[in-house]
């Protein structure tokens, strides 16, 4: 009755001093398979008997939650909770907690890194040189171009001034825009259609729509500027992979970079093998600083929830 399951790969592989706080509070910390995202079978084996869970991005289904009859709280080491069956958690009175903003800086900096990698064909050039080939792709400069954000929350608010610092203009769509956010005259909030139609680069920083449908589809891609660059460090479900591939093949999309996948490791869709695509293995929040912040916040959230719940 005092066990806490820890599943994030960044913690199961190397451990973390922040977890000692849980032990000092009297909890027995147990881990899923080191460095591997647990599947449903492993969660069904490990989670029953636990009062708390410090969770990563693995899917936590209704079946798992219903089997974990002692579970009081799930604390994510990140912001997204779309991997958790929230309706079932609510029905079972299981608190779901988020580490708000913990990974924002890491994701924002990766976004800018992917942007530069796309426009200067850095991965391609590196691969050619290592293969003994002298092949070059002409790049473009960023100054004066328009960077479009779909989602301008904690991450988008960090990406915007970085892009402005590179000499770009930034237009941002957000379902609930913070009108107090005005980092520069080179920034403005816009409608989604405005961002889609006028941005040279479009970067996704929003949760999946409630209807589960992708935002980036064949029709939306057709409304973009020819030669647009697309970046996705948010969720795989925001884009239709087949439609993005078709856009790359037609030249409507000049390049695509993603750090998000439906499953990890991903099934290698033809999109991922395209020469104009950059892949990273979900490393947006995988920095020393982000892991530190996320672990600390997740542990604090979990302890507070368990202390409150178990004292009732």
Image: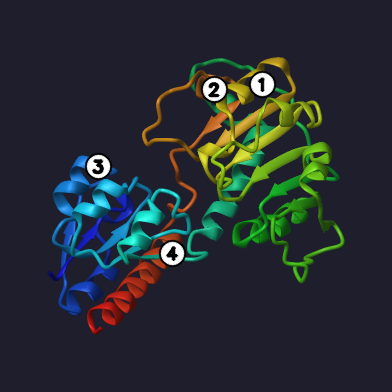
Q: Residues within 10 Å of mark 4 (few under 14, many from 20)?
A: many
Q: CA distance from mark 4 to mark 1?
A: 35 Å
Q: Is residue 144 left or right of residue 121?
A: right
For disc 2, the neighbor class at 10 Å (few under 14, some 14 to 19, many from 20) is some
Marks 3, 2: nearer the viewer: 3
User: Between disc 1 and disc 3, whose residue precedes?
Assistant: 3
Q: Secondary structure at mark 1?
A: helix
Q: CA distance from mark 1 to mark 2?
A: 9 Å
First in sequence, mark 3 or 4: give its number: 3
Q: Which residue is mark 1?
A: 248
| Residue 136 showing in the rendered view | no
| Residue 287 visible from this viewpoint | yes
Q: Is residue 161 above or below residue 17?
A: above
Residue at 31 percent of width and 53 percent of height: 8
Q: CA distance from mark 4 to mark 2?
A: 31 Å
Q: Position of residue 303 (x, y in %)?
A: 29, 76
């Amino acid at each position: 009755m005092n066990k806490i399951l820890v599943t994030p790969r960044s913690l199961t592989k190397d451990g973390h001093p922040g977890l000692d706080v849980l032990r000092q509070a009297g909890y027995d910390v147990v881990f899923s398979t080191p460095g591997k995202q647990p599947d449903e079978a492993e969660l069904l084996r490990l989670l029953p008997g636990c009062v708390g869970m410090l969770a990563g991005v693995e899917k936590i289904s209704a079946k798992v939650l219903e089997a974990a009859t002692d579970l009081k709280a799930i604390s994510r080491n990140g912001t997204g909770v779309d991997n958790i069956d929230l309706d079932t958690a609510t029905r079972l009175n299981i608190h779901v907690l988020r580490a708000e903003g913990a990974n924002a800086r890491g994701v924002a900096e990766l976004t800018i890194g992917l942007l530069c990698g796309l426009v200067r064909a850095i991965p391609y050039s590196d691969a050619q040189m290592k293969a003994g080939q002298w092949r070059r792709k002409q790049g473009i400069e960023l100054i004066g171009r328009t960077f479009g954000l779909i989602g301008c929350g904690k991450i988008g608010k960090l990406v915007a001034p970085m892009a402005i610092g590179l000499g770009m203009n930034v237009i941002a769509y957000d379902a609930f825009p913070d009108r107090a956010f005005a980092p520069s005259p080179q920034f403005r909030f816009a409608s989604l259609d405005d961002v889609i139609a006028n941005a040279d680069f479009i970067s996704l920083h929003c949760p999946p729509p409630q209807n589960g449908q992708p935002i980036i589809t064949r029709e939306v891609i057709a409304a973009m500027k020819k030669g647009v660059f697309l970046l996705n460090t948010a969720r795989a479900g925001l884009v239709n992979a087949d439609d993005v591939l078709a856009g790359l093949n037609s030249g409507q999309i000049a390049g695509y970079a993603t750090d998000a996948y439906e499953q990890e490791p991903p099934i290698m869709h033809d999109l991922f093998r395209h020469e104009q695509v950059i892949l990273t293995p979900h490393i947006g929040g995988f920095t020393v600083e982000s892991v530190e912040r996320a672990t600390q916040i997740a542990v604090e959230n979990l302890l507070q929830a368990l202390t409150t719940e178990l004292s009732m």
